[in-house]
Image (cartoon, helix red, strand yellow):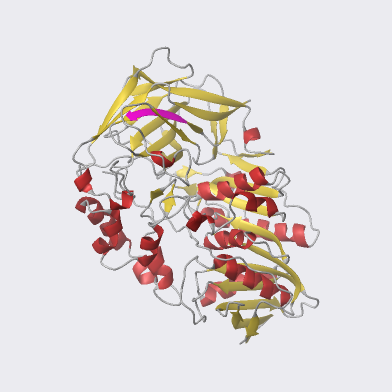
Amino acid sequence: MKTTIHLILVCMGLFAHAFAQQPKPAVEIIAGGTAAQGYDIQDSVLIKTREGMQLSAMVVRKKGAGKPQPAALFFTIYANHDGNLAEAKRSADHGYIGVVVNSRGKALSPDEINPYEKESTDVNGAVDWASKHPWTDGRVAIYGGSYSGFSAWAATKHLHPALKTIVPYVAAIPGFGLPMENNVFLNANYGWGFYVSNNKYLDEHLYYDQQHWRNMQFNWYNSGVAYRKIDSIEGRPNPLLQRWIQHPSYDQYWQDMVPWQEEFAKINIPVLSVTGYYDDGQISALRYFKEHYKYNKQADHYLIIGPYDHFGAQKGGVPILRDYKVDQIALINTAQITYDWLDYVLKAGPKPALLKDKINYQVMGANRWKHAPSIEKMSNQVLRLYLSTEKSGENQLLLPKKPGQPAFSPQKVDLADRQHSNNNNYYPYPIVGNELDRSTGLYFISAPFDEQVSIDGIWSGILKAGINKKDMDIGMTLFEVMPNGERFHLSYFLGRASYAKDMTRRSLLKEGTINSIPFSSTRMFSRYLSKGSRLLLVLDINKNPFAQINYGTGRDVSDESIADAKVPLNIKWYNDSYIDIPVWKY
């Protein structure tokens, strides 16, 4: 069984009511302050909102700044005095009023800690207050990664007129990236609620006890108890998780947290998004981008994406990422690009040089950046490959022509088996390697490419399957097999079949018939493939300690247990299933 666990720190958020604009100030200041050489600092500010709540904040400007300046707002649940002060000082150093505001209940706020649940109200209250601060000129920008990136999007659900731009990095969509991905609840940030809510700052001692969380996941997996009872295995109630699992669909609860559908049409401010091919929450960051353009054809939204993980995207990458030597040209300075962007929007400065088109992406292996006006224009051809039943050694073939005769590949999964796990190859660690766990799943390989190409964009497809149950959780992993035999992890997909057509409404599979299961929420990547490289697709059922286990009864998956696994899951994967690969032919 694969045992590598990567603890994903992707910030989530829950939202409530909109900020209702009023002619009077939405907040009052209860201020305290300190002095530091070179800076005017207010590090003990309490922002009192119209709802009567208080938010802890810091405000910093350079001494002698003279005339009022725009505010650069960083909204975060990660309350840390020194770290937050350093963030505010950095903005001051770049010619802005540095404003850091902590989530309700954190730091000096006397209120109850409620991760995510009031962010759209509270972030807008912070924007309103910052725009009226005597040091500012009335204009506000929001920037930052992870929770702060999410907070920036929260503010746009009901856009405040003082908010002029946002720069979100690796921004999550609650209910879409974490705590569940494509409607499958994940265990990666199970302890996050304790981390941010056990005290006014951060419970680092508990959260960074990786052995504790690892043991919890394996103990739950081996016990076979229902997912709803996972906190009984860990040993303490997890109210945040229990609240989340009441909403397995992307329903109104989640939709109220960030812009939803037509609300994107009203977002008319410039946006710069940053994410990475190996950012665990990439599908969220890209969904913001796609939905913005879907509902607002005139959106002014730029994207930077390259070979970065969740943390690397926030600083601009690292030379070696999970055993992959990153192209030198991919290493950027995210902070500098952020302030250059703010200068461009707020001070009529030049546009950051990297932003040559709406999508700016680094081609792994080519040591170059490419630029495109849309996701569709990243490629000039779509390569459709069918999951055939024809064998080639230990693999089956990915064929460019639809098979003439219907056939299927059988798979049997014992959901009660705890000696083995499934979908063990999905996580991209390492990115480059030789080892592959072939104990479960089906393996499909393409013919070698007869010319140099790059794969640029988001892969998708349709699976055709018959099963003896009502649901299943599907895992797919896409590799490049290089001419030297090494495998390069390109992308992966995890999703619940019953939500494949609509993440807001469950539609159970039908037994005894062929079900069509579309998928598109995969991870974008760009990779140069040399002549002789091949594609390898691994198809499996997700059953491991790192996510909810779908036993296929059709009931709420959180209520299912190993008692529902008496009959193995039998699948027929039909050979008219296919994947679409976006290719750039030179």
- Indicate left or right for 227 with 495 as reference: left
Which residue appears at 51% of the width and 28% of the height? 580
- Indicate left or right for 177 with 275 as reference: left
Locate residue 238, reporting x and y percent: 34, 65
The answer to whether residue 305 is above or below residue 118 is above
Locate residue 464, reporting x and y percent: 40, 27
Q: Quadrant of the N terminus?
A: top left
Q: Quadrant of residue 443?
A: top left
The answer to whether residue 81 is above or below residue 560 is below
Locate residue 302, reporting x and y percent: 67, 48
Residue nearest the observer in this picture, 482 or 491: 491
Q: Is residue 496 visible?
A: no
- Indicate left or right for 279 with 542 as reference: right
Q: Quadrant of residue 138?
A: bottom right
The answer to whether residue 148 is above or below residue 476 is below
Residue nearest the observer in this picture, 224 or 170: 224
Which residue appears at 66% of the width and 72% of the height? 98
Residue lying furthest top? 404
Locate residue 64, reporting x and y percent: 77, 80
Q: Is residue 253 visible?
A: yes
Q: Quadrant of the C terminus?
A: top right
Q: Main secondary structure of the magenta part?
A: strand
What segment is highlighted magenta in the picture?
Answer: 462-466
- Indicate left or right for 438 with 368 as reference: left
Q: Is residue 523 magenta?
A: no
Q: Quadrant of residue 499?
A: top left
